[in-house]
Amino acid sequence: MGADAETDSDAETTRLTEYTELHGCSCKVGQGDLDSLLADAGLTGESDPLLFGIGEDAAARKLTDDIALVSTVDFFTPIVDDPYDFGRVAACNAASDAFATGAVENVDCLVVLGLPRELTDNAAPILAGMADALDTMDGVIAGGHTIMSPWPFAGGAISATARPEALLTSQGASPGDQLYLTKPIGTQPAMGATRVTDEQFVETVTDATDRPLDTIASEAIEWMTTPNRDAVSACREHATAATDITGFGLAGQSRVVAARSNVGIELTHLPVIAGTPDLSTLFGYGLTDGESAETSGGLFVSVPPTATDAVESAFDDAGVFYRAVGHATAGRGVTIDDPTLEEVRR
């Protein structure tokens, strides 16, 4: 066998996404199933030692009058084949749950990593990607745990601190609040297109959009490896509620905010990664209905009308992407009725 053939064979055997049936945050347990699981386990009530916990993106414990400790854990299967990029995405996604609560200081990560035996050579670049991503968030890897697993996965347990009064939950939105999103959606169809290997279907996927598939994918990776630290630092002084957009999709995470804040949510504007709506239609991901699973998505924050100018100025000063996507109402549930689609290019 020639050297080229060996290289091709090696490339095939190290495609991380081929080792799992579900990819990125789409491997999460469904929203309804998770609610049932927590109810069956009796884990739906509040815990006195915590400021908040189950049902929020992270848990918070008040240590002193000036410091609250926020902790969370998040890991998932590969959404990209490159192990270094997988590590970067995994670290950004895990830290995002802490950032969604407003905690951005003293970020530590205990790595959670699992790989099939034949992919153990990928451990080092995955960890390097995680370390480099955390470095951009002023965070560090503090340890972790690695196992053999038939499905590869990576992520970590994140801890961070904030002043107790700076913390955010999904419970504070009020009717009239403006809703902002700090990244476009569309990571599921963007990356789903890269996993198509059937030659006949490759042509169908390529023809489905007028943008090169590798351009769409590279932009999705850029968004997924953009931490939400600057975004929450810019808005947490004025925001009334926050979450990050992950496996439940924009509609699913909006339903969490609506239910926990006891408000209605109307989404009228959807920023999407350019080229992904057509791919979503082809794959049936439900992007334009807000149902497509997102991986390492943006923050979804509510802001009172009196503070929107200040928040938008803060986003601009921080160089953070943002779009006003709707508002909270006195109703119930989530409405997405013929929203304006904005195709975003980096």
Image: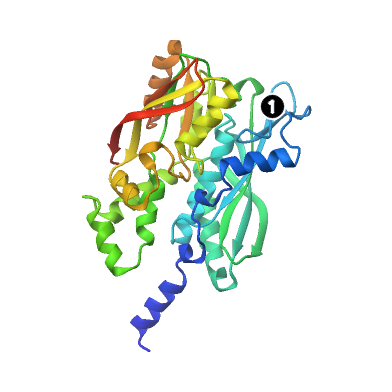
The x, y position of residue 13, in whole percent, is 46, 73
Give the quadrant of the C terminus.
top left
Choose between 329 and 306: the one closer to the eye.
329
Label 1 neighbourhood size at 10 Å, few (<14), some (14-19), many (20+)? some
Q: Image quarter for residue 311?
A: top left
Give the quadrant of the N terminus.
bottom left
Residue 302, above or below 195? above
Residue at 76% x, 37% y: name it. Answer: 42
Residue 217, above or below 38? below
Note whether residue 301 is visible: yes
The x, y position of residue 98, in whole percent, is 59, 36
Residue at 52% x, 31% y: name it. Answer: 255
Residue 302, above or below 141? above
Residue at 34% x, 52% y: name it. Answer: 218
Q: Amino acid at mark 1?
A: Ile
Q: Image quarter for residue 196?
A: bottom left
Q: Is residue 208 left or right of residue 331?
A: left
The x, y position of residue 216, in whole percent, is 31, 50
Residue 227, above or below 171? below
The x, y position of residue 275, in whole percent, is 28, 46
Residue receiving disc 1: 67
Q: Image quarter for residue 338?
A: top left
Give the secondary structure at mark 1.
loop
Q: Residue furthest bottom?
A: 1
Number of marks: 1
Q: Residue furthest top?
A: 306
